[in-house]
Image (tube, helix red, strand yellow):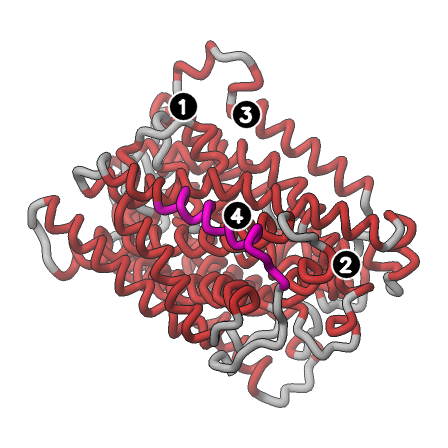
Amino acid sequence: MILAQSALRLDATWVDYSLVALYFVFVLGIGWAARSKVSSSIDFFLSGRSLPAWVTGLAFISANLGAVEIVGHSANGVQYGFQTMHYFWIGAIPAMVFLGIVMMPFYYGSKVRSVPEFMLRRFGPGAHLVNALSFAIAQLLIAGVNLLLLAKVVNSLLGWPLWVTLIVAAVIVLSYITLGGLSAAIYNEVLQFFVIIAALLPLTMIGLHQVGGWSGLQEKVAASSHFHTWPGTEISGFDNPVVSVIGLVFGLGFVLSFGYWTTNFVEVQRSMAADSLSSARKTPIIGAFPKMFIPFIVVIPGMVAGATVTPIMDKSAQPNDAILYLMRDLLPNGLLGIAIAGLLAAFMAGMAANISAFNTVFSYDIWQTYVVKDRKDDYYLTVGRVATIAATAIAVFTALIANNFGNVMDYLQTLFGFFNAPLFATFLIGMFWKRMTPTAGWASLVSGTGAAIIYWYVAEFTSASSTLFNLPGQGTAFVAASIAFVVDVIVAVAVSLVTQPKPDEELVGFVKSVTPKAHLTDAAEASLPWYQRTVPLGILCLVLVIVLNVVFA
């Protein structure tokens, strides 16, 4: 139960507490400083579209560097080793490059304030409302994951009951978002990025030294498959190597990955805050470079914990706790304080990203569009701040749901399969096929999400004997996402053929074939050197990730 007190304690001293306290002073100080720049709803929700590419690029990756990266993937490191790299090299980089090169011109060029608003202008109210509601629900559930793990760190540090630390952690995140809006979240995410690296890099190096280096780790980890990425049968759940590769490439690398990175407003919002189209396009690609190498300082500590930490080895502790046990056992005082601050930074970055995206969608896409229309801008700014408070309070309760999963990656991939996979299918068809109709937009979303939920329910709560419903690893999430994608495509095409499409003039800026090329490019970028242009940077990312896949195959 979440109200129980954990047996794990971190032996912190005044040095560690001082470092953590200093970090929180900076966090709240950034929120207070950003407060003076918030004079309108656009300032609060999108930072006035004024931030440079390097800031939005680091914030883009830091917003994702929360529970999924630190706890989820270190837990995966315990269970699957280097097969976890697929979530980064197959399940992130290609989609991030695609977002920057192909999709950001539509998002940024159309001047929409959110991803659901893009759906409104492309497909109309039906698809818009479905997307806005499903996104808002998903963010409340995922914010609970980050809040739960943030509370667990404080619980291990201070020994307080988890229900107390949940409330304390929520109040801290709430304070700086409510003060400074998205600007406070983004500038804190940049700070948090460096704090996280400073925490995880020493832990990785000390952990490797403790086990005798790379060769020592290979001796202590019994499963040789933990040092190879392909064919990834353990993490996919498919025994057949060929089927496993197909499942990883299609289910994770295409459906889940592109669904998450290209349509998830938590990430896209950071690009929308950039100061130009060129900066917006480069934002996810700048973030892709550190994203490639982050798994080395996340997965390897999980592998070290799985080979050396007794409670993890004998399964008396959950894989989610691996990183905390490793910190307790390996880090001296001082470094422990930095590591604690790094974990707190990671979970706060993740939760702040969820909450800041939620308050934008709730205020613009639900409240302003369907509840109270045509009020002054100050009114919606107030609604956004109230929504922030309400979302943070709800996240305290959704943390209870997340606590039922031993590996949070199982929980998160399930959510992504429900919401992101069908959304990506609808986006992809709608962006490249002008014949897709408004009716098909909402019908495909509902059908895809419904199909994924039905499959998940059968797999989890019935005694279905088919191999397709009894997959180990995270194969169930891959299959659910694939089903959602395929059903969405079929319904979108079938419904479009029997319903009325929008006229071409209403699709300019939303469908590639009817949008002038000048609308999708930034003329000023052509005069920049190659390393400051979007497409060459994207190509370099793809080459590097191919090399990594080959080297660690």
Which sits earlier in the primary sequence, circle 2 or circle 3? 2
Instruction: Indicate the amino acid at tag 1.
Output: Thr
Considering every residue shown, the one lying at the far top of the view is 527
- In front of the other: label 3 or label 4? 4
10 Å crowding of disc 1: few (<14), some (14-19), many (20+): some
Instruction: Indicate the amino acid at tag 4.
Output: Leu
**Taking the image as drawn, is residue 448 in sight?**
no
10 Å crowding of disc 3: few (<14), some (14-19), many (20+): some
Residue in the picture at 68% in, 79% down: 470
Residue 535 tag number = 3
Pinpoint residue 20: horizontal percent, then vertical percent: 50, 51
Q: Which residues are magenta?
A: 11-28
Q: Which residue is mark 1?
A: 521
Instruction: Indicate the amino acid at tag 3.
Output: Val
Q: Quadrant of residue 97?
A: top right
Q: Which residue is mark 4?
A: 19
**Element under disc 1:** loop
Q: Which residue is mark 2?
A: 303
Which sits earlier in the primary sequence, circle 2 or circle 1? 2
State how far apart marks 3 and 4 are (Cα). Answer: 41 Å
Pinpoint residue 400: horizontal percent, then vertical percent: 45, 76
In the rendered image, the vertical position of residue 402 relative to residue 519, given as above or below: below
Contact between labelled residues 1 and 2, with CB atoms less than 8 Å apart: no
Contact between labelled residues 1 and 4, with CB atoms less than 8 Å apart: no
- In front of the other: label 2 or label 4? 4
